[in-house]
Image (cartoon, helix red, strand yellow):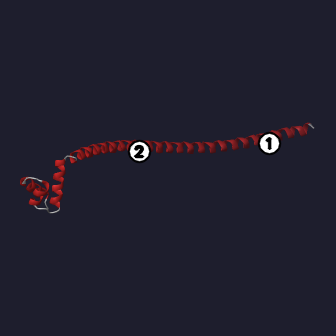
Amino acid sequence: MNELFLWIVPAVLLLAIVGLWLAINKRQRQISALKLLFHEQQRQISSVKAEIHELRTGTLGVGSRVQDVEGKLAQAMERQEQLSQVNSDPQSKLYGHAMKMVELGASVDDIMRECELPRGEAELLVSLHGK
């Protein structure tokens, strides 16, 4: 029995060592796979951060453009208001009507009679806006 014991103990120890070695090898492969996965996730995180930065930068650019457009729109609206106030003046309506007549080919005498303008002003309008 002592002889059998002398053979069994080393065999069991050898099997235990081989089993431990296989388990350690398996764990090392799992650790390597996890490291690869970790590095891939880090790369993806960096890529997403870069995309977010680009989006943020683009959004800031769009925001400043919107502000510029809003400023220009406000100026245009103010200018339009000024022009509408000028056009509400009866005198400017007469000149507007006279310019339309010139564009349609009316004579100086027709413009003077229709718009009640002096000859010099009617001639000036014809010379400036005539075709």
Asked whether the residues under the numbered discs 2 and 1 touch, taking CB atoms below 8 Å apart as contact, a structural biologist would say no
Disc 2 from disc 1: Cα separation: 64 Å
Q: Quadrant of the C terminus?
A: bottom left
- Residue 103 is left or right of residue 34, and the answer is left
Residue position marked by numbered label 2 in the rendering = 58
The residue nearer to you, when weighing 60 against 89, is 89
Q: Residues within 10 Å of mark 1 (few under 14, many from 20)?
A: few
Residue position marked by numbered label 1 in the rendering = 15
- Residue 103 is left or right of residue 23, and the answer is left
The residue nearer to you, when weighing 39 against 41, is 41
Q: Residues within 10 Å of mark 2 (few under 14, many from 20)?
A: few
In the current view of this chain or complex, which residue is farthest to the right? 1
Q: Quadrant of the N terminus?
A: top right
The residue lying at 85 percent from left, 38 percent from top is 9
The residue lying at 18 percent from left, 58 percent from top is 100
- Residue 53 is left or right of residue 76, and the answer is right
- Residue 40 is left or right of residue 62, and the answer is right
Could you tell me residue 30's position as x and y percent? 66, 43
The residue lying at 60 percent from left, 44 percent from top is 37
Q: Check disc 1 and give the amino acid type.
A: Leu
The residue lying at 90 percent from left, 40 percent from top is 4
Could you tell me residue 27's position as x and y percent? 69, 42
Q: Secondary structure at mark 1?
A: helix
